[in-house]
Image: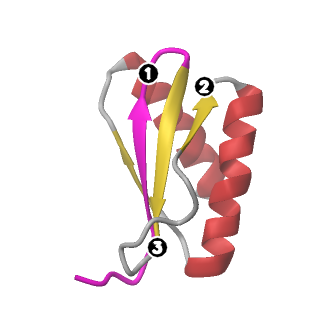
Amino acid sequence: MEKDYPVVGIDVAKESSYYAIRRPDGTLYGNTFQAKNDGKGLSFVLKKLRKVEETFGKPRLVIESTGYFSARLVHFFTSSLCE
């Protein structure tokens, strides 16, 4: 089933998270990657997400619920992408 938006899956861990980006047609966009859950790592991810948005439209983020660790990412992405 084709969607009209890209999807970003995030596997959350304490120190870093793993990311996979799917195009609207469901195919993988680039390679999966890992980024630290610190300012530098999240800035790197934000750059990638902005490029995805420019190319395909606003992505939907699917974040693993891990309590405290995922809550930090939800807060970061909500405040950074919902401008």
Relative horizontal placement of residue 9, taking residue 47 as reference (left or right): left
Q: Amino acid at mark 2?
A: Asn
Place of residue 51 in the rendered image (x, y in percent of width and height, measured from the top left):
70, 66
- Residue at image x 70%, y 32%? 41
Q: Residues within 10 Å of mark 2 (few under 14, many from 20)?
A: many
Q: Which residue is mark 1?
A: 13
Q: Is residue 22 above or below residue 66?
A: below
Q: What residue sits 33% from the left and 21% below the top? A: 67
Task: Give the residue type that dot 1 points to.
Answer: Ala
Distance from disc 1 to disc 2, alpha carbons, whole Å, reads 8 Å
Q: Residue at x 60, y 25 (%)?
A: 37
Q: Along the line of sight, which residue is nearer the eye, 79 or 61?
A: 61
Query: Taken as a whole, is the magenta stretch helix, strand or loop?
Result: loop
Decide which of 83, 30 is in the foreground and name it. Answer: 30
Identify residue for label 3.
23
Q: Residues within 10 Å of mark 1 (few under 14, many from 20)?
A: some
Task: Give me the C-alpha separation between circle 2 and circle 3.
Answer: 24 Å
Residue 14 magenta-highlighted: yes
Label 1: state its secondary structure.
loop
- Residue 61 is left or right of residue 54, and the answer is left
Q: Which residue is mark 2?
A: 37
| Tag 2–tag 3 contact (CB < 8 Å) | no
The kind of residue tagged 3 is Arg
Residue extent of the magenta highlight:
1-15
The colour mode here is secondary structure
